[in-house]
Image (spheres, grey):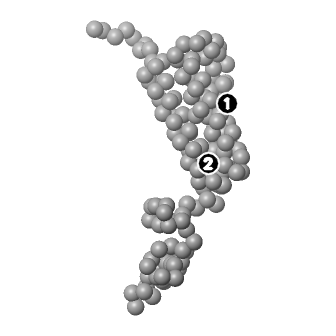
Amino acid sequence: MLESLSATTSRREGRTTSPDHKGTPSGRDQTRVRPFRLCPELDVLSSLARLVPVFLGIYLAAKVIDLTLRGVWPLAFDGSLRGILFLLELALGVALPMILLAQERVRRSTTGLLASAALVVGGVVFNRINVFLVAYQPLYPVKT
């Protein structure tokens, strides 16, 4: 009874059990530990990842337009810490993941998706560090 309930649950969840009926998923690498014994749904993740370069392109265009309208492009290339960190943020956090996720091969691999997502998250963290810690200058003098 318990075995049939386990088999029914496994079939409902889209898993099959191995012939030894010990509850291990068949057809998977047994040395890898996966959360809840589920494989990533690459079809869903890759279709979502197809949209990420579009949004990163919009973000990059907004950054370029902002710098152009304010006329501060020379500050990005002046060799200061602010300029270098800004260029690294754009290169590693925006341009590189945009290029990677534009490739079908990267979108179809879990490693490629993880690396690209990590670069995007790192770019956001880099942006917050640049805006608040590195380039922040208060509008009003600080009283000491």
Q: Position of residue 93 (x, y in %)?
A: 58, 34
Residue 97 appears in view: yes
Q: Position of residue 30 (x, y in %)?
A: 50, 67
Quarter of the image where one finds residue 88: top right
Quick one: which residue is furthest to the bottom in this view? 1
Label tally: 2
Picture quarter with the C terminus: top left
Identify residue for label 2: 112
Q: Position of residue 69 (x, y in %)?
A: 66, 18
- Label 1 is placed on what type of residue? Ala
- Check whether the beta carbons of the residues at disc 2 and disc 1 lie within 8 A of each other: no
**Could you tell whether 80 is left or right of 57 in the image?**
left
Give whichever of discs 2 and 1 has the lower sequence position: 1
Q: Secondary structure at mark 1?
A: helix
Residue 59 appears in view: no
Q: Who's the residue at 56% across and 23% down the image?
A: 86
Q: Who's the residue at 57% across and 28% down the image?
A: 89
Quarter of the image where one finds residue 44: bottom right
Q: Who's the residue at 44% across and 24% down the image?
A: 132
Asked whether 59 or 25 is in front, the reply is 25
- Label 2 is placed on what type of residue? Gly
Q: Which mark is residue 49?
A: none
Picture quarter with the N terminus: bottom left
CA–CA distance in space, label 2 to label 1: 24 Å
In this view, 89 is above or below 100: above
Q: Which mark is residue 61?
A: 1
Q: Position of residue 84 (x, y in %)?
A: 56, 19
